[in-house]
Amino acid sequence: MYLDEFEYYAPKTADETFELAGRLGSQAKVLAGGTDLILNMKQSLLKPQCLIDINGVKEFQGLIYEAGKGAVIGAATKISELEHSAVLRDKYFALHQAARELGSTQVRAMATIGGNICNASPAAETSSPLVALGTKVVINSAAGERELPLEDFIIGNRKTALEQGELLVKFLLPEPAPQTASCYTNIGLRNAMEIDAVNMAVNLTLEADNRTVKVLRLVMGSVAPRPLVSVEVPALLVGQALNSNLIEKAAAAAAGEAQPISDIRATAEYRREAVFVLSRRVLQEAFNAAQEV
Amino acid sequence: MKQQLIQLEINNQLYEIPVTPRDLLVDVIRKKVGITGTKKGCGEGDCGACTVLMDGAPVLSCLTLAITCQGRKIITIEGLADEQGALHPIQQSFLDHGAVQCGFCTPGMILTTKALLDKNPHPDQTSIKRGIAGNICRCTGYKKIVEAIGAAADRIATREVK
């Protein structure tokens, strides 16, 4: 398996990158970790004439957390850095869990969070927790900057809101409210190196009484063309003191909302059943964790 | 396409190599540098046979463009033994435990293990299995591989060698 020819650009600054992206337009693809892009090029699914390698641009890398303000994650930050970040584990547990589950040691050392999102696979590990955590993305081009909630950035199966010449440059994660916990879970054909048949993340905030749901976000992955934000689960649970009966009802509602298809990894029927089981599990886990914050 | 000269640091030695942008690191290491311990398996990033260490991190050389590696420190399996040729404790442990069958996955397994033990010097069995989940042994000799890694961790801890 060999690659077709292409021209290679390695900008050193963000401005240089935006200038190149604007000038080269649809001929160019951005090279971050390459675990999806190079593979797609090997399989001739993509044939870009130019690659813009953003790994030399420091502005696109790293994770910064500021107490009270939240976290900023550069788009070219490696998944392995997220996996081993103590701040992520303490403050944004669902994303930490998803980073641990993505690919293999080698894939996590190469792949970036921006790549995982821009590839926009419905089965992506990081999109469900990022959406559940209320993440916004910052999009840049030579013309300027704009922000979008992540759920509006991923618009379909492998489709994003990026216009020609634009790059996703960072993720903004809000500071978790007090009494908040987040959890991620997934199911696939095997435990390692699998692509999720269903994944799910929940972000749950409790009232001061430690029992009543104040805010809740449940997001399902791999059961719709893009991350599916549950409407019915918050409608059932917000304002209620949580118990196992309610969680059972909410899980059934989530299963009803899912829009799964049958493919090589699972049947639609199996996926719907998995949504029920996983939502029950992840809601209970988030509830327990939020009580102990 | 026109070739350009790039500098690659492999096993602490600097090489000047003509490449085109599409040359993959695994092919450059094997064909242009001429050291063939790095194996080419699936070519899709699934099997881990092509694993090399880049600035200490295990990466898949079959999905890495050589041109992106300038200024990085690359270690292949040939770079693990010391200058006198004494095997690295991980290599010795693989031999002692019969963790090498056909040997094709071994370079990748050992380099991934090196990265694992550098980060986590005392992994439990689950951490070992998670650590090598991206390295496939088609002889299925996993039991002895996991044992060898555990023993290598102990050996490194007691002798305090890296």
Image: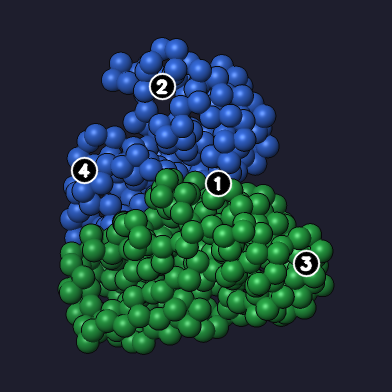
Report helix, strand or loop for mark 2: loop
Q: Are marks 4 and 1 on the same chain?
A: yes
Task: Using the image, tell me which numbered label, if any, was put on residue B88.
Answer: 2
Q: Are the two marked residues, 4 and 1, in contact with CB atoms closer than 8 angstroms?
A: no
Disc 1 target residue: B134
Q: Are marks 2 and 1 on the same chain?
A: yes
Foreground pick, B74 / B25: B74
Chain for numbered disc 1 = B
Chain for numbered disc 4 = B
Report helix, strand or loop for mark 1: loop
> Looking at the image, is A9 positioned above or below residue B154?
below
Disc 3 target residue: A246
Report helix, strand or loop for mark 3: helix
Q: Are the two marked residues, 1 and 3, in contact with CB atoms closer than 8 angstroms?
A: no
> Alpha carbon of mark 4 to alpha carbon of mark 1: how far?
29 Å
Q: Residues within 10 Å of mark 1 (few under 14, many from 20)?
A: many
> Alpha carbon of mark 2 to alpha carbon of mark 4: how far?
24 Å
Residue A67 pos. (x, y %): 34, 56
Name the kind of residue labelled 4 in the image: Tyr
Position of A137 with respect to A256 (left or right) is left
Disc 4 target residue: B15
Depth check, mark 4 against mark 1: the one in front is 1
Chain colored blue: B
In the displayed image of the protein, which residue is found farthest to the top?
Answer: B159
In this structure image, what is the colour of chain A? green
> Alpha carbon of mark 4 to alpha carbon of mark 3: how far?
65 Å
Name the kind of residue labelled 3 in the image: Leu
Name the kind of residue labelled 2 in the image: His
Residue A154 pos. (x, y %): 49, 79
